[in-house]
Amino acid sequence: MNFPTQYDQILARVEAIQPLEYASTRNYLRGAVSYLSPYISRGVVSTRQVLESLLQRGFQRHELEKFVQELAWRDYFQQVWEALGNDLMQDIKQPQPDVAYTQMAQAIVNASTGIEAIDQSIKTLYETGYMHNHARMYVASLACNVGKAHWKVPARWLYYHLLDADVASNTCSWQWVAGAFSAKKYYANQENINRYTGSRQGQTFLDTTYEQIALVPIPSVLKPQTLPALPTKLPAQKPLQLQPNLPTLIYNAYNLEVLWHAGEEANRILLLEPSHFAQYPMCPKTIDFILALAQNITGIQCFVGEFQALKESYSLQGEIIFKKHPAFAHYVGKAEERAYMFPELKGYFPSFFNYWSKCEKYFKKMC
């Protein structure tokens, strides 16, 4: 498993999507998933760009529907964040029930839970920065619903290690599994894990029925708790060569779009604010990934510091342009819209399926 950073290889990955194979195998760890999430999260390509590529390849609506629906989850979670702002970091619909801990199980951090497929997925995360979506649900269920930890700390731990670290998708997904953003908790038993991971393990604390799994006492292996250290190491600041009277395009960890204002004369700044990473820490592997992706953007320079410090240090007089994003609401200048698949839909929707029912109307018109 690898994640190239050259733009032509990323586009080749977009072109390689097989939506029907994806629909039938996506829940399996060896299924035909797209491995596009790190590029969508970092804003190198948008959900809209991926959808348009699939339509240009001639796929029909029934062939695309499942894949597009999964892309729509990402747009939906982003719109939840836009609507809720900082309240995203609180239980969205109701308090997570039955919380016993506010840290997280040491065994999850150490990949020593005894559930072989889950432990291997955590080791793969540390090695590659990637975890299959189904494995993320297993880990969250183990941490929150079996281990009875509140979702905040384990969600922050997972975000830290992911190349596709996305606050909206990660936070909403953990809350969905934990029952704070859904009608009920999500549980996976050993039979389900074996089916989708290819493991054959038995006689574990998850080797029981769904009726019984919610009643299982916290396993002793999940009782020792920890608060993981999650330091972010940003690159050293180097002097910038800017033309103060030109427009300045602000890129960040969520906007590394190569085609954004391509060919226009402008200052191009990758802004890495220490305050942002103090709130949402990322591991060195993800920071290096961001820096490598930025190299696809001609003329980009990196500024490690706050937005206001950039303006003041370089006396920027031209227009400052950036993409609208909830994490960067403090930017001042011209805010451009994010490239959603269905930009007509705005605001908060109480559930994904309420949102998707509206999306379908526009999706049908495109196909």
Image: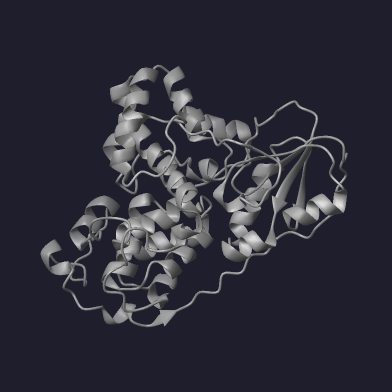
Residue closest to the eye, 177 or 96: 96
Q: Is residue 91 left or right of residue 14?
A: left
The quarter holding residue 115 reads: bottom left
The quarter holding residue 149 reads: bottom left
Q: Position of residue 6 (x, y in %)?
A: 63, 37
Q: Position of residue 321 (x, y in %)?
A: 70, 38
Q: Residue at x 79, y 34 (%)?
A: 266
The quarter holding residue 338 reads: top right
Q: Residue at x 28, y 55 (%)?
A: 182
Q: Residue at x 44, y 71 (%)?
A: 109
Q: Position of residue 48 (x, y in %)?
A: 49, 30
- The relative height of residue 227 versus residue 83 in the rendered view (above or below) is below
Residue closest to the eye, 137 or 273: 273
Pick the quarter of the image with the C terminus. top left
Residue 367 visible from this viewpoint: no
Q: How many marks?
A: 0
Residue closest to the eye, 298 or 48: 48
